Image (cartoon, helix red, strand yellow):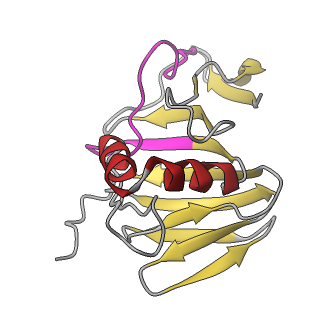
């Protein structure tokens, strides 16, 4: 679990720790193809929201989309399990079944670089916390290690954990109103 400390200010304008607890919004995808994949939705903002005195857990009891929209931002911790078992399962499904499954997840399954290639409508900053992972792009890839930072700028990409260990990445996702490239 991820510990989250949130500050606020009171009616007198003094700062204080409003919350010090575990993240309350953790998503574990319902499919079982990639066991161990999870997202801790740490915090989010909406366009035009300004801090008010006091504290409200803006992530509690709501569904948070994979990508932000309408000026939102999302802070998310993602745990990527090793992908070997997942890729073996996809291969055993056969081309048509695996393609149909990936389509339900909204992935560009016809991209030959990686079955989980996708494009988000956001500018994403990713900071590798632990483990290692490959960032796969249309033309190339690079391996990332703890402390590495990615600026994922609305591009097609996939995260490929080829190791035997979990990789943890902190993402800040920003809706930036940019049209997708043609």
**55, above or below 151, in the image:** above
Does the magenta run of residues contain 56?
yes
**85, above or below 144, in the image:** above
Q: Main secondary structure of the magenta part?
A: loop
Image quadrant assignment for residue 55: top right
**Quadrant of the snapshot with the N terminus:** top right
**Magenta-drawn segment:** 54-75
Q: Farthest residue toward the bottom?
A: 139
x then y, percent, for residue 147 = 79, 66
Which of the pair 45/125 is nearer the observer?
A: 125
Does the magenta run of residues contain 46?
no
Left or right: 161 in relation to 177 = right
Query: What's the residue at 73%, 22% (across, down)?
Result: 16
Query: What's the residue at 22%, 68% (across, down)?
Result: 180
x then y, percent, for residue 160 = 62, 63
Which of the pair 109/134 is nearer the observer?
A: 109
x then y, percent, for residue 6 = 68, 27
Query: What's the residue at 74%, 28% (across, down)?
Result: 5
């Amino acid at each position: 679990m991820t510990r989250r400390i949130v500050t606020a200010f009171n009616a007198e304008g003094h700062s204080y720790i409003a919350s010090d607890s575990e993240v309350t919004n953790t998503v574990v995808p319902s499919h079982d193809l990639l066991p161990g994949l999870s997202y801790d939705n740490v915090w989010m903002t909406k366009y035009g929201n300004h801090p008010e005195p006091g504290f409200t857990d803006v992530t509690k009891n709501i569904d948070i989309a994979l990508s932000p929209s309408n000026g939102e931002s999302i802070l998310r911790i993602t745990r990527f399990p090793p992908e070997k078992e997942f890729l073996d399962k996809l291969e055993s499904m056969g081309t048509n079944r695996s393609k149909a499954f990936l389509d339900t997840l909204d992935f560009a399954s016809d991209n030959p670089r990686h079955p989980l290639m996708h494009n988000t409508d956001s500018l994403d900053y990713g900071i590798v916390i632990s483990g290692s992972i490959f960032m796969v792009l249309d033309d190339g890839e690079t391996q990332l290690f703890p402390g590495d930072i990615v600026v994922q700028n609305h591009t097609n990409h996939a995260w490929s954990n080829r190791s035997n260990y979990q990789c943890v990445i902190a993402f800040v996702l920003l809706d930036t109103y940019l049209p997708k490239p043609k």
